[in-house]
Amino acid sequence: MPTRRQLRINNLLQEEISRIIRTEVRDPDIGFTTITGVEVSADLQQAYVYTSVMGEEAQVRATMVALTRARRMIRSELGDRIQLKYIPELIFELDETARRAQRIEALISKFESEVEQEDTTPSNEEGYGDSVGGDFSATIAQIGQLLKEGHPTAIFIHHNPDGDALGSGLALSLALQQLEQTVPVVCADAVPHRYEFLPATDRISSDVPEYFELAVVLDAADRPQLGNIADELQRAETIVWIDHHHTSQGGGDIDYLDRTAAATALLIRRVINALGLEITTDIATCLYTALATDTGFFTFENTSVQALEVAAALVKAGADPQAIAAAARDQHQLPALRLQGRALTSIASAAGGRIIYAALTPGDFAAAQADPEDTEGIIDLLRTAAGGEVQVLFKAVSHNHWRVSLRSSVIDVATIAQDFGGGGHTAAAGCSMSGSLPEVRARMMKTITSVLDREQ
C-alpha cells in the first residue's frame, strides 16, 4: 500500500512529466501520448511511468523507444521543477488500456458500417430478438465480430458450476469449432456427476491456457464467482462478459448483461445465431440443459414465454427433454439421496412458518459420504413446504464457514444475499457466511424477517 508521501510524489511526477513531454520534448517519433499514472518505488529510487499511446503498432513501438531516449532529459527537467532530494530513475511502461478501448471502438465502427450496408438482424423466430430487456443487437454484433477474428480464446465459467454455466460454456465452445477454433472452458471446480452426460465435457478444465488474448466470461455476476482462477483474467487483452443475473456487475471490456433473461443460455444462443452458425444436436442439448436447469425445468418464476419458445426450438434442433431431465434432475447418486434425508430431518421454520430452513453440517456430509455438489436440488424440496414464503439452506463448506442458498416468490432474495456479499436472482440467490451455525442462522433469520415485515 503506497504511503501518503508516495501518492503525493506519484501525482506530482505524473503532472510534471506530462507537461515536459508536451512542451519540451521535440522528438518527432513521439506520437499521441498520455501519461496515465506514475508509481514510485518504496525507496523513491525508481518511478514507473505508465504511458498510453494511440496509433498502429509501429507508432506505439517508436514512441516508447523515443520516450526511453528522452528520459535523461526529462529527469533533468524534473530536477529543475520540483523539490525532491532525489529525482527517481524513470522507467516508461506501456499502458494497454487506451489501445484496448481504441480497438473496441474500431470494432463498433465496423459493425455500424456493416449494419448500414446490409440488414442482417435475424427475426424473433431465429432467437436473436427474443430479449425483453432491451436492444442488445449492437453488443451482440460486436461480440460476434470479435469471435470471428479468431483470437486465441478461453471461456471462463463460475466455480461450483451449475447447468447454465456448463451448458452455455460448452455450447459456445462447440459453436466456435465450426469456425475452426478450439476453445477450452475453464472452471475452478470439476464437472458435477449429474452433468457428465453433456457433450464435450473433456473441454472443461481447471487449467488456464498458457496464452489467450480473448476471455469470455459466462454466467458469473462478478469476478469472485470465478473462484481461484479470477486473477487469470488480467492476462487477456480483451474481456467479454455475458450474464443474466439480477445482481450482475459485469467487468469486461464488452459487457452483455440482460438481467431479464431466464438463463445465460438465451444470450449465448443469440450470439451463436449472430455468428451465422448451426445449432447442432450437441449445441441444442447443452443450451436446453442450461435453460431447463435454470428455470427449474420450466417451473420457476423466471420461466418466460421467450424461454419456452427457445426451448421448443432447441427440441426441434435435436435436444431430448426426457433424456436431459432424467440425467440432470431425476438421477441421484446414493450420497446425494442420503444428504437429502439428513437435510429434511433438520428442517425447521421461523417467522410464524413464513421461513422454512434446513442445515447440513460437516457431520452430515461425512455421514452421507457426500460432496458439495450433492446438495443441488435440496433447496427446491424446501419449497414444497406449505405456507413457506422464503426457503433457506445452510451448507457447511468448512468449520464455521457456510454457503447459504435462498429462494422466495414474495421478496427479493438477491438484495438479502447482497447484504452478505453474495448475489443472484430476485427469486433465487446465495451468499457465504462465517461463524457458528446458530450465529449465522440468527443473523440470516433477523434480516429475512425484517424484509418480510416491511412487505406486509
Image (cartoon, rainbow, N blue to C red):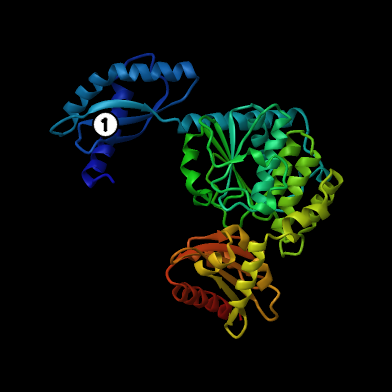
Q: Decide which of 305, 265 is in the foreground and name it.
A: 265
Give the quadrant of residue 136. top right
The quadrant of the picture occupied by the C terminus is bottom right
Q: Secondary structure at mark 1?
A: strand
Depicted 248 relative to depicted 215: above or below: below
Relative side of 202 to 102, left or right: right
Who's the residue at 53% across and 48% down the image?
226
Instruction: State the residue position of label 1.
Output: 47
Total number of numbered discs in the rendering: 1
Who's the residue at 38% across and 13% down the image?
28
Give the quadrant of residue 436. bottom left
Depicted 63 relative to depicted 227: above or below: above
Depicted 92 relative to depicted 59: above or below: below
User: Dot 1, crowdedness within 10 Å: few (<14), some or many (≥20)?
Assistant: many
Q: Decide which of 139, 434 is in the foreground and name it.
A: 434
Relative side of 248 to 296, left or right: left
Q: Position of residue 110 (x, y in %)?
A: 65, 28
Relative side of 32 to 140, left or right: left
Who's the residue at 78% across and 33% down the image?
119
Give the quadrant of residue 306. bottom right
Which residue lies most toward the top here? 28
Q: Which residue type does callout 1 highlight?
A: Ala
Who's the residue at 66% across and 52% down the image?
193
Relative side of 41 to 433, left or right: left
Residue 135 seen in this snapshot: no
Q: Position of residue 128 (x, y in %)?
A: 76, 43
Residue 117 seen in this snapshot: yes
Q: Position of residue 362 (x, y in %)?
A: 50, 66
Q: Decide which of 219, 99 is in the foreground and name it.
A: 219
